[in-house]
Image: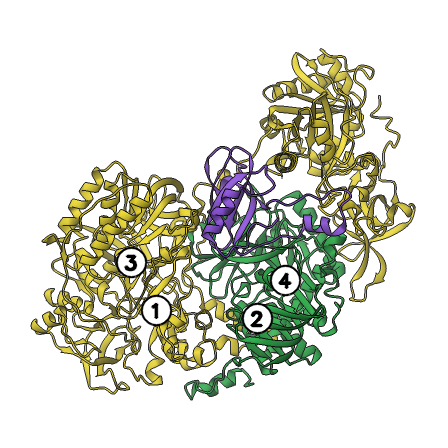
Chain colours: A purple, B yellow, C green
Amino acid sequence: MLLLTCPYCGVEADETELTPGGEAHITRHGAGANDDDFETYLFMRKNPKGVHFERWRHAFGCGKWFHAARCTMTLEVFGTYSGQTFEPPKTLINKIKKKRPDWEGFVK
Amino acid sequence: MSTRLQNGGRLIDRTKQIEFTWNGKRLQGFQGDTLASALLANNQMLVGRSFKYHRPRGIVAAGPEEPNALMGTGVDGHFEPNQRATTTELYQGLTSHSQNHWPSLEIDIGALNSKLPRFFPAGFYYKTFMYPRAAWKHVFEPIIRKSAGLGKAPTHKDEDTYEYFYAHVDIMIVGGGIAGLAAALTAGKSGASVLLMEQGVSFGGRAITDGVEIDGKPAATWVKATLAALKKMPNVQIRTRMMGAGVYDHGYALGYERLTDHLGPNQNGPRHRLWRIRTKRIVTATGAIERPLSFAGNDIPGVMLAGSLRDYIADYGVSAGDRTVVVTNNDDGYRTAIALHEAGLNVPCIIDPRGDLDGELPQKAIALGIRVENKSAIGKVKGGKRVESVTLCAQAGEGGTLEEIKCDAVAMSGGWSPVVHLWSHCGGKLNWDTDLAMFRPDPSRPPLGADGTGFVIATGTANGHLYSASVLKDAIAAGKQAAKDAGFKATGTVPKASDEKAAPIAAVWSMPQGATYDLKSKTFLDYQNDVKVSDVRLAAQEGFTSVEHAKRYTTLGMATDQGKLSNINGLAVLADSLNKEIPQVGTTTFRPPYHPISFGAIVGDARGELFKPIRKSPIHQWIDDNGGDWEPVADWRRPYCYKQQGETVEQAVTREILNTRENCGLLDASTLGKIIVKGPDAGKFMDMMYTNMMSTLKVGFCRYGLMCTENGFLSDDGVVARLSENTYLCHTTSGGSDRIHAWMEEWLQTEWWDWKVYTANVTEQYAQIAIVGPNARKVLEKLGGMDVSPEALPFMQFRDGKIGGIQARPFRISFSGELSYEIAVPASQGQAFWDMCMEAGAEFGMQPYGTECLHVMRAEKGFIMIGDETDGTVIPQDLGLNWAISKKKEDFLGKRAQQRSHMTDSKRWKLVGLKPVDPQAVIPDGAYATDGTTRPNGVKNMIGRVTSTYFSPTLNHAIAMGLVEHGPDRMGEVIDFPTIGGDIIKAEICDPVFLDKEGARQNV
Amino acid sequence: MKRYSAFAIAREAFRHHAGWERAWRSPEPKSEYDVIIVGAGGHGLATAYYLGKNFGITNVAVIEKGWLGGGNTGRNTTIIRSNYLQDPSAAIYEKARSLYETMSQDLNYNVMFSPRGVMMLAQTQAEIRGYQRTAHANNLQGVTTEFITPERVKELCPIIELGGPRYPVLGALWQPRGGTARHDAVAWGYARACSDMGMDIIQQCEVTGIDQSRGKVTGVQTTKGAIKTKKLAIIVAGNSGDLAKMGGFRLPVESISLQALVSEPIKPCMDVVIMANTVHGYMSQSDKGEMVIGGGTDGYNNFTQRGSYHHLEETVRALIETFPMVSRLKMLRHWGGIIDITGDRSPIISKTPLGNCFINCGWGTGGFKAIPGSGWAMAELVAGGEPRELASAFGLERYQEGRFIDESVAAGVAH
């Protein structure tokens, strides 16, 4: 059972308090988008074995959506951060790079 | 024979005799006995039958690792199969039965299998029973199934109760031996909150049984003092009869506490308590389990683990036999010989495959005059339901008998395996220690917590330390480490303990070394599943060389003990067969729980009424009291209809429809979702959420709206009201309120976070009551307080005010086609308002109606229902709802998706009405339409399906709605709906609005 | 290949079973094959088998990173059924189910297919309508199912509690020829048959790269060296993303964990497979006597294959409502399997943007029951280069077209 800290209310929350929301930092392609972009937006996912940036909602807590960086192989959580940003904070990226020198880095 | 000794037994109280029954026999034991020790005291060594061959099985162990002594205990609602006799504490009146035999334990027909084991090698199932084909299902499988399984299935509802417990502690320590106690003391002194759990009833573990001295005194003295010190610490909780059941990600763990099992049935309070624990560090001081040795006949009742045998002497004052041969590949086995000797029992011989016996314990045994044979082995054990003798042979040979030694018990020790289960559950890795012949935790590869650091610390024997001095040192270090990791500072001094100087263990995996096939095929690895050395060798021979393959092919380690006794020995045999080292073969995965836990405990008190609490509208109780026939709708209950005396459900529904259409009906619509959307950008936001243009809706007006997913599919619908310039009220379906509210929040928070909009789910703040029918207005006028005339409150508008003295907001909307007001009142006033309506409506024929009436009336009007006309694959365009899709808006959720080629395909099935040619023939729910052609793969070509189908009492005609290929272009055509019975119902394609197309009934 | 039979066992019994051969050979890879299949799970081995059996293509290697059958083939709850709603699903699952009927004889390996019947409980009005719809569709699709009354449910499964209280049993969709099979045996049986046809099953060999030239596959790089091939079939479930990346294309696939558990074995008490979708649980009794229980999925990307306790707690609660006797049994073991799910939760059997490279993945919670049908359809695709009837709807292009195969329509989850 995962444990994630909600960056809004500061609560270290059990997985049962949270709902997962899949890969983070996906660009919405709406009306007018071409077929490839629209398909990518809806379906194509990185599904990495390793560092994954993802969305969570503190659904049974403060109700806020936030972001987390988590390893899908070890389930280590590198950090959580605001849901209202287009990319992970630099400090977090540096922290992950330090821990995982082989990591390819954040790719939008 | 096995019997109770005159003296000894530190856990039993000889002044308190307990009566129990076993297989119908009345027997006696003492307070503190386990069922196993009591059975042994009554000379009952034979306690069960094995799984495959139904071979006689005796008690092997004294703890939870026991594979054989599984019993059915209790009766009726307290019956439980597969209880380990070794962990079942005796209580007055305990009823128990042995398992897996017919007609009796002594004479078991199934044991015929054991006469022919050569015909049942590993994997024999896969090689036979294939011909003729039908025979597997009808002949072979029933036989195999009947002979499989262990205990009987319970037949009664569980009469016990269970509960959960939540604990948040800094440090959880599993195991109450000297390692666990020392770690707990160290961690406790640091100020960290500590939870110490012991699966048994007493603390100190093997150190007490084996007479260890700590700080110059018996271990028991140190244990007592340490416990006393721990009990004084307010930050330390201590629990017995509580097992560390599982370790999960991020420091989550389960503790399984058995509260009343030792007291018997009908106790006050729960039987089991499942602790759900969050902790920063877990210290596993779970000790070790002794391994059997592999020699022919090692499964005959009377062959036991050496350590367990001396447990029975020390803890329960029970001897397993009068003459016990000890066979061991390590010094620890000698303790048993010495304990037996000291208890005045006969040890005819200690058999040891090792050459040099210069350890202190062997020397002591020799000095006591016990015969010790080195470089020796057991050729085979003789006996049927009880050991009669063993043959002595050279370990180096093929098993030729040198001498036959009469005995009635054999104590075996193949060395000790640390209990690494909890370490491994969450990914902790192991190293093979060749010197100690054991897998032990690799501290550099622990299970990782949320922060990426190891959160489990194995210590003591569980960490591979077999001697008390190093155990204590390791445990103090573990306590310090855990405290430090949890943010505390710990100090601690290591108590002094002394251990006998020991000679190294000899890794003997087969006895004798060159055992013949005949011996190997009688040498058991897994006692319960009847897996023999020859089976593992056969698996290797046939290419099942991965440990996972071999395990699955032979079923080694898949019994109820999950390989606690058999895995390492099996692994060693496999490695040997492949000419590999043990670490190259690897282990199978350790899965939780450590030891089986009751499903009752997993469920706790979330059963019956508490399984899933029902969401209730303010009118719920009234409905329940007035004939409401409930159906589950999402988390709610809604009345399908209100049954009056003597009515069938169908009659009730018909009455409700006709009455509502002719007079007046009252519907509890409180379950409809109600969401407020508010803010300067509310209009912009509403335009994205709905396919319709909502920003142009005037204050005081209502509009029916559709919501789609980004995939274009229709997901919800409902009436939107604009309460003020900046405020909208969105109605959703009953099942949709939480989902849609979350959906709105997701978009607001994660995509359009710069838009100034707030949402609030106010579903439960209001009761919503629909007054429907030609007399609706009369009822409201009688209640008074608001002008509800067509001029003051026209169709698709709402007003705020008071009706009958209650704050109310009537919406002039209609889901039935009748004159209708849906009136929202504060939830607390809901029942009062409902009562008022019923009373005022009495003279106008007011009757409550349920969901089925609602469904039929809306189908008569051709209104769609989310979940009937939609199923997650339907887009609004399929339903003829293009009028609700704004062409003016640049974007809305689902717009882009609806432009994809499959979404614009002209062959998509479209909504039509269906009028059965036979007016009485209702098309069955879910029926498909066919055109009489067959597809290349033999499937009958389907051209549409019914989505809603009813008999309309209003029209006295069966009606339906459905999706049909090119449907709207085929008005008047008759198509076929085959039923499952083979009949065909013919129906004419028509407009889906069956009643009052012009809306004359509602616009009055 | 030495035939397996009761007579063979009797013969071997008298010579200490010394005559049994390896079930499959363990060769070193050749330098080139006509077809390389990556992944020796059920689907990969079945594909190889039908390539040989139906198309005579036997110069085939099946390359496996770990041990054959070591993925989801060996850790699922072994349910076999074909009572799917949508035409493409019903067709491929029914093909699979019918192949299971004769698999033991086809492979000369007893996979213990047990057509004991599969029942999906209807516990809400919506479920009744959904399953009645499925029954109608199945009737036309040639899949034998029927919607049965609660009384019939009780007759087929006496341990069930019909009354609720929360979710009463209102009926069920019943497929009498659905059932279970011995999962490991399916992989082993196919492997033995493939090996016998001369195919090479190469275990402990990881693919590290895909070689291509002018948009077409030419071979693979592996931990046992480079191997050339004319065609490549990627059938690696949760590892599909890695292989696709090597091939230079993307997949609409994510990996999540699915929970399962077994009880201690008890004497037979339940002769059918029961699925309850409203409460997310399903249960059957294995031939060993264990109650095999499946539950929900974690909603997040996960490759750990560990059990997640709180999910099975929900499953067990629900099952005890429907089967009260379960309360007095004990959980023996629980685990997680990594399932690969697609955008519409239906599988992909498809050509890829890379020439002569084919993919089969995305079976989600429904992989085991599909193995023979999936292998059959994939063999058709690999042999002919184009999908035939069975696979035609499962192409990758459907996501761009918006042409989904959505099975959640009739039942909340598809297991």
- Image quadrant of residue C48? bottom right
Q: Mark 4 points at which residue?
A: C244
Q: Nearer the viewer, residue B531 or B94?
A: B531
Please report, as a chain letter, where disc 1 is located.
B
Q: Name the residue under label 1.
A: B568
Alpha carbons under labels 4 and 2: distance apart: 17 Å
Which three-letter amino acid code belongs to the residue tagged 1?
Ile
Q: Would residue B625 appear left or right of A6 to someone viewing this image?
A: right
Callout 3 crowding tier (Cα within 10 Å): few <14, some 14–19, many ≥20: many
Residue B1 seen in the figure: no
Between circles 3 and 4, the one closer to the viewer is 4
Q: Label 3 marks which chain's residue?
A: B
Disc 1 to disc 2, C-alpha distance: 28 Å
- Seen in the image, is A28 located left or right of residue A13? right
| Nearer to the camera, B427 or B1000 | B427
**Which of the two marks, 4 or 2, is nearer to us in this view?**
4
Q: What's the residue type where badge 3 is placed?
A: Ala
Amino acid type assigned to the residue bearing label 4 in the image: Ala
Relative to B284, is A67 on the left or the right? right
* Residue position marked by numbered label 3 in the rendering: B462
The image quarter containing residue A31 is top right
Whichever of labels 4 and 2 marks the residue nearer the N terminus, that label is: 2
Name the foreground residue: B297 vs B474: B474
Task: State the image quarter where residue B362 is shown.
Answer: bottom left
- Give me the disc on residue C40: 2
